[in-house]
Image (spheres, rainbow, N blue to C red):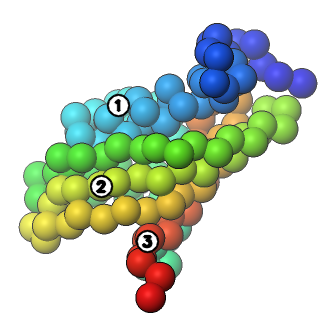
Amino acid sequence: MAHSDCAQPNHLYSPEQLELIEVDQRFQQAFIDKDIGAIDALLVDDYVLVSSNGSQRTKGEVLEAIASPRSTWQINQTRDWDIRIHGSVAIVVATLHQKGIDQGTPFDSQVRFSDTYVCENGQWRQLHAHASRITPVP
């Protein structure tokens, strides 16, 4: 059931989970680097993001937003991964700290996201993402 082409060894996670963590870290770093090619390669063509405000963005819209000179990421770092793998499909849930400027407006937020990945030709690619802003409980 596991895809050995998508695996690397590690003592804390299964090989497949480690590979997904590495993919996630490359994905998050690509925002800071504005590496449109890397993000394009990691997203399937019919990718959809549901953001914390409930809006939806397609792959094209996400790539356009990242390429904008009015948007930059200084921090885009994940932690606390919880990963479930079922055959060629994986769900990655983690906490993401983001800080930067979005269309001229500064932001510094924590979100919890769930990303759905599919393993195609030995490569994990993101199919869907959902993010919820983490707010303190009163």
Is 133 above or below relative to 101? Answer: below
Name the mark on residue 108: none
Identify which residue, 36 or 25, lies in the foreground. Answer: 25
Is 40 above or below relative to 69? Answer: above
- Mark 2 neighbour density, 10 Å: few (under 14) some (14–19) many (20 or more): some
Q: Is there a contact, CB below 8 Å, between mark 2 and mark 1?
A: no
Q: Real-space Cα distance between discs 2 and 3? A: 11 Å
Q: Residue 87 location, x and y as percent?
A: 85, 32
Q: Residue at x 31, y 65 (%)?
A: 109
Q: Residue at x 75, y 42 (%)?
A: 84
Q: Nearer the viewer, mark 2 or mark 1?
A: 2
Residue 128 seen in this snapshot: yes
Please indicate whether residue 134 sits to the left or right of residue 66 in the image.
Answer: right
Identify residue for label 2: 98
Q: Real-space Cα distance between discs 2 and 1? A: 21 Å
Looking at the rendering, which quadrant does residue 3 occupy? top right
Q: Most extreme residue toward the front, as rendered?
A: 138
Q: Residue 101 location, x and y as percent?
A: 15, 60
Q: Residue at x 84, y 38 (%)?
A: 86
Is 71 above or below relative to 116? Answer: below
Amino acid at dot 3: Arg
Identify residue for label 3: 133
If the image is split into quadrants, where does the C terminus sit? bottom left
Name the mark on residue 37: 1
Q: Residue at x 47, y 53 (%)?
A: 95
